[in-house]
Amino acid sequence: MLLIVLAVFSVALAFQGPVPGYLRHSGLTYAAAVAATILPALGGWAVSRRALRLIERYPEDPNRGQYAFNSAIGYLQMFLGAAHIALLLLTRWPIECGRLPIVGDWIVAPSLLTVTPFLIAVVLLWLATYPAERAVRQIALEVFLFRHRPVQPVWTLGQYLTFNFRHQVLCVLVPMVFMLAGRDLLYQNEAALQRWSGLRDMPDLMLGALTVVVAIFAPLLIRHTWITAPLSPGPLRDRLLLLGEKLRVRCREILVWKSGGLIVNAAVMGLFAPLRYVLLTDGMLANLDDRKIEAVFGHEAGHVRRWHIPYLLLFSLISGCLLQIFAIRMHGASTQTYQIGAVVLGAFMLVKWGVIFLWMSQRFERQADIFGVRALQLTGVPCNQPCFVHHFAAAGESAMPVAPKSDEAIRESANAAELPRASGRRQPICTTCAHIFSETLNEVAVLNGIAPESGSPRHGSIAGRSRFLQALARDPSALERFERTMSWVQAAIILAAIACAAWAAHEMKLWPMVRSLSERILAVR
């Protein structure tokens, strides 16, 4: 849902009016807004009812209901996002909102009104799916009880709505308000900026710079939007800080992400170390042992060390550059040409974000999983299975394992001097560590009420990720092929971002401005 919210707000930021504008009648426009608001909730009600029936019909196998619910809810959220993006781009809804009394003269207000049906639709969807969500959480609590862990009551409806709104909407809404305000102020003073700079697209250039600034400082805003607190001093904090030092991953703070003990999850945010936070939920700290928490920490560190956040920003930059190029090329074009171009661009964006991004995101998760396994190797996990790191004399030789290392020897080998081998992209991974990491993934899924085979568009299924790790531990050549593929993917993102940025700069005529500015500076000297 967080990505859906980000996508809808990004469209509201990029387009102040409809693109093709197929629905021109005001009555039909309002009808479309109502339909986009109500239909996802009706779908959520149907999904919730079906999941509850499956849970009641097969009490001995609650995974059926969990799988049905988790699988359907992802598609339902994508439908909700697509419906409201279509409302913004294909109807006169943004224009109708701007025509309301007083609203048109205020900054931010028209844009917030355009996304109001979306926000209402999100809340209605949560209301419709709450009964099934509550049932899934109650099943997960049985696992907590079985493990003799502390159990918190399942969220009330008010707590459920508040938590979701803060963590899935407000964390996007707050930074986006700054960007919407900046955009409106820039375009209200567009003529003055163009005269001052001599550049027709100066407002767009300044908006791009504002976007970068907001992206850099967003973690500070999100930290206070979410319910967080620093991890208390103690052995676990010391171990995580030591592991971060060995992995060469720095952060401003390790935070406890408070969820009432009901969410078992972790996250990392921040482009630079002074503004980077690693978050661990209170449910994870209460229900996983320290070794598995280190595995999760290693996974989040993998996102940092493999530069996933910068690559995602570059991937977004490609879209921003293409939108700017489209706006410049279509300036003054006929309505028919504009609509054809918009359809082509829209189809490309759909493939880019709906297919390529999801494929890439799943591979990034697997790459972070591999790094998490390597992080476990650094903590000195005793290896008790045949593997290519500890027990085989050499890859390709006899499968007869040699005597395993003692715990002390393994800890001594996991020092900073051997860090390149432990975290090198194409070095084999320990079978035992891969097994522990797979157990951690499965435990996180069960504690969150997620069926391990249930797939996620962004992350894939837990079971699939576990099988992938086990296969790589048994076949180092497969690991090398995967990392080689990821190197090519990341290189392609960099090249595409550079090409699109250069193209956009050419269309905006930035190069003459840079040359003129350089000449002025040299003349002054």
Image (cartoon, rainbow, N blue to C red):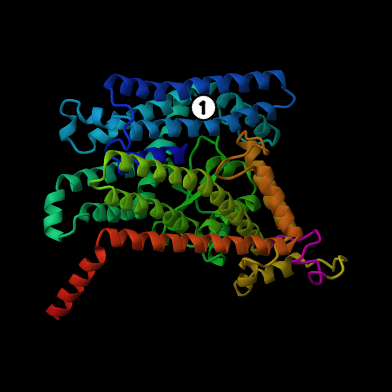
Q: Is residue 468 above or below residue 406?
A: above
**Is the magenta region chiefly helix, strand or loop?**
loop
Q: Which residues are magenta?
A: 379-396
The location of residue 452, given as percent across then percent down, is: 67, 39
Q: Is residue 96 above or below residue 407?
A: above
Q: Is residue 82 left or right of residue 134?
A: left
Report whether residue 368 is seen. yes
Q: Quadrant of the C terminus?
A: bottom left
Report whether residue 163 is seen. no
Q: Could you tell me which residue is drawn at 62 percent across and 23 percent down?
A: 51
Q: Is residue 103 above or below residue 53?
A: below
Crowd rating for badge 1 (residues with CA inside 10 Å; few <14, some 14–19, many 20+): some
Viewer-proximal residue, 90 or 43? 90
Magenta stretch holds residue 382: yes
Callout 1 secondary element: loop
- Residue type, label 1: Trp
Q: Quadrant of residue 209?
A: bottom left
Q: Could you tell me which residue is drawn at 35 percent across and 20 percent down?
A: 31
Viewer-proximal residue, 479 or 446? 479
Label 1 belongs to which residue?
155
Q: Could you tell me which residue is drawn at 79 percent across and 72 percent down?
A: 394
Magenta stretch holds residue 140: no
The location of residue 350, given as percent across then percent down, is: 46, 42
Q: Could you tell me which residue is drawn at 72 percent across and 22 percent down?
A: 59
The location of residue 278, given as percent across then percent down, is: 49, 52
The location of residue 91, given as percent across then percent down, is: 32, 30
Q: Is residue 351 left or right of residue 434?
A: left
Farthest residue, direction bottom: 525
Q: Is residue 295 left or right of residue 85?
A: right
Q: Is residue 395 left or right of residue 166?
A: right
